[in-house]
Image (cartoon, rainbow, N blue to C red):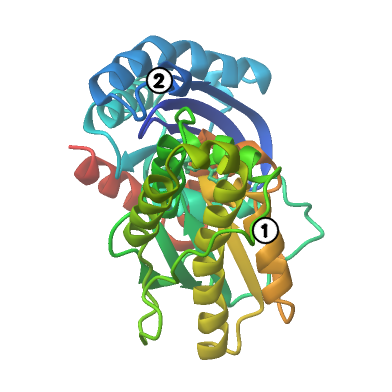
Amino acid sequence: MKILGLETSCDETSAAVIEDGRTVLSCVIASSKNDFAERGGVIPEYAARRQLECILPVIQKALDDAKLGAADIDAIAVTYGPGLLGSLLVGTSTMRILAALWQKPLLPIHHHHGHLDSIWLDLPNAIEVQFPVLTLSVSGGHTEVWLRTSHTEAELIASTRDDAAGEAFDKGALLLGLPYPGGPALAKMADTGDETTHAFPSPLHGQETMDFSFSGLKTSLKYVLRDLGSAADMQHADIAASYQKAICLHLVRRITKALDRYPDVKEVHVVGGVSANTRLRSMLQEHCQSVTVRWPSKLVYCTDNGAMIAAAAYFRHTIEHAETAWRTQASVSLS
Ligand code: KG4
Ligand code: ZN
């Protein structure tokens, strides 16, 4: 089954064609991220205009790269939310029109379900994921832990009370004078620093909760920089490394707590933009040795992309619903 997936929830316009939920035949991503480098964040109206410019060429390239035409596509999937309203409207309106023109089922997908299923993209067929799975989903918009018992059944067991982990990276990067999106830039700077030099607090320490909180870490970074004054300039790499370690440690501590609470769990997955972070990956491997730890097979599948939306549509479509059910849901969700 070949699904054309589209993701336009923020500043990426991405279309992809996926076969049977795992094999990526094409994945095209146009991003307006660099346009926001100096501003420290996305300008929603501008991002929506860029979506409009990119959307048709990106869809066409995804079909061309897969060497397919509209007639070869079995269904169309599109992110319906959450995200920036203008950007989402460009994607959902375009896909509604294409679905009507091409006479294909339209499958609306929640952005977070896309990230959860990004783990299956280009995963070799010989590898079968063992449920139950704990999935740490960490991006610029959300930070969650899901207990997944099958491809389509999942319970949300923890989420952030304030900032998302990616936001903590982005805001920290801004304080350190790095361009948006700050995560990759801060991680690169941290590579050359010593993570043991600056102590950051452990959020929600001593509390029973599984939730996350990142806003205190960002405030601590502000105070560290203020207190050091001009001396901070010489220590940016060490500060970045220590700050990154504090974010990752908070995430990892929640996962090890969840593993104690759910001893049947066989695998830990980390998905979303922050799953690209190599320090987070190594810390998870170090602290979760009793289970298999996975992250998306390519860096582009960590950040927003159309392939994960098509994968989520495949599993939800083929496993849980009849085609007609999807059609009904699509018309409700997108109307
Ligand atoms: O999943 P994503 O592309 O978009 C949202 O759904 O938010 O995630 C983007 C977030 C940004 O906050 C970005 O700074 C962060 O992921 N990110 C990283 C890295 N690469 C991207 N954070 C830390 N280390 C990275 N290597
Ligand atoms: Zn995302």
Dot 1 amino acid type: Arg
Q: Which residue is under mark 2?
A: 38
Q: How many C-alpha atoms fall within 10 Å of the one at disc 2: few (<14), some, or many (≥20)?
A: few
Residue 322 x %, y %: 41, 55
Q: In which quarter of the image is ligand 2?
A: top left
Whether residue 246 is situated above or below residue 273 in the rendered picture: below
Local secondary structure at mark 1: helix
Q: Is residue 65 left or right of residue 29?
A: right
Residue 64 x %, y %: 63, 15
Q: Which residue is under mark 1?
A: 281
Q: Residue at x 30, y 27 (%)?
A: 87
Dot 2 amino acid type: Glu
Q: Residue at x 69, y 41 (%)?
A: 298
Which one is in front, 107 or 46? Answer: 46
Q: Which residue is drawn at 64% across and 57% down?
A: 195
Nearest to viewer (mark 2 / mark 1) = 2
Residue 286 x %, y %: 73, 71
Q: How many C-alpha atoms fall within 10 Å of the one at disc 1: few (<14), some, or many (≥20)?
A: some
Q: Residue at x 28, y 24 (%)?
A: 43
